């Protein structure tokens, strides 16, 4: 009976150790963005506008305990439901000259299995770069899929864009971007 109890405890301990190791991030990892929805929100006293892109591409690499992710989308891939407004947005943000918006995320590899991710962001848009420290994203893990959601707190002035106006009233400075992405570690 004692041998059976000891064997059961040993097996449970081994199983727990195996599960912990399976959840711990590997030393070097490569990640791929499989799905994305990026939505900017523009606000004006007369109306609210959301422009959405599902065309972002992304990759990530983790080395020596640090992860670096890159996400990029074509400026023209954002759709607000009004082609004239979208064309004006491309003109205002100098989309012909700077056709890509890119975001570099940096975070500790040890946080990859956490429900919240504390990231430092570097956003390149309209020919300018803005830095955001400690942006919090929510994460849910389902098997190998890491579903990440959150908001990038960007503003028009961060990118030195002259705010467009309607009836001589400019849009609000805040243009937050909602992020909804699914990432997978590559074998």
Image: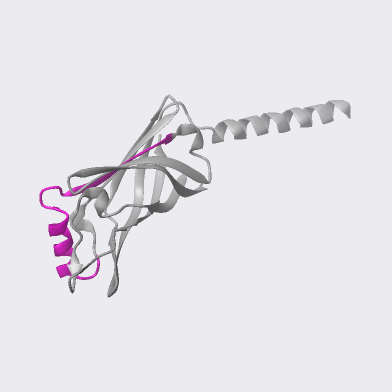
Residue 105: % across, % down: 36, 40
Q: Quadrant of the C terminus?
A: top left
Task: Find out whether residue 88 is within the magenta segment.
Answer: yes
- Which residue corresponds to the image point at 52% horizontal and 40% vertical from the top-left? 113
In the displayed structure image, the side of residue 117 where residue 79 appears, left or right? left
Q: Nearer the viewer, residue 126 or 163?
A: 163
**Is 167 located above or below residue 36 in the figure?**
below
Residue that lies at the very extreme toward the front in this rendered image = 168
Stretch in magenta: 80-107
- Which residue corresponds to the image point at 34% horizontal and 53% vertical from the top-left? 36
Q: How many marks?
A: 0
Q: Nearer the viewer, residue 3 or 87?
A: 87
Q: Nearer the viewer, residue 152 or 102?
A: 152
**Is 68 located above or below residue 103 in the figure?**
above
Residue that lies at the very extreme toward the right in this rendered image = 1
**Is 62 located above or below residue 97 in the figure?**
above
Residue 98: % across, % down: 15, 47
In the displayed structure image, the side of residue 144 where residue 165 appears, left or right? left
- Which residue corresponds to the image point at 24% horizontal and 63% vertical from the top-left? 79
- Which residue corresponds to the image point at 10% horizontal and 48% vertical from the top-left? 97
């Amino acid at each position: 009976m004692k041998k059976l109890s000891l064997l059961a405890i040993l097996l449970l301990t081994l199983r727990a150790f195996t599960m912990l190791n399976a959840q711990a991030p590997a030393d070097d990892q490569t990640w791929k963005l499989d799905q994305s929805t990026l939505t900017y929100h523009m606000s004006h006293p007369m109306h609210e506008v959301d422009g959405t892109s599902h065309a972002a591409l992304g990759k990530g690499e983790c080395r020596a305990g640090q992860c670096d992710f890159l996400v990029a989308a074509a400026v023209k891939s954002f759709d607000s439901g009004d082609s004239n407004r979208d064309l004006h947005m491309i003109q205002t943000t100098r989309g012909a000259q700077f056709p890509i918006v890119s975001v570099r995320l940096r975070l500790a590899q040890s946080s990859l299995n956490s429900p919240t991710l504390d990231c430092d962001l570097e956003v390149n848009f309209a020919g300018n770069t803005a830095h955001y420290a400690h942006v919090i994203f929510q994460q849910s893990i389902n098997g190998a899929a890491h579903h990440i959601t959150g908001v990038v707190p960007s503003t028009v002035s961060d990118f030195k864009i002259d705010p467009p106006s309607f009836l001589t009233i400019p849009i609000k400075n805040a243009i937050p971007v909602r992020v909804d992405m699914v990432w997978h570690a590559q074998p």
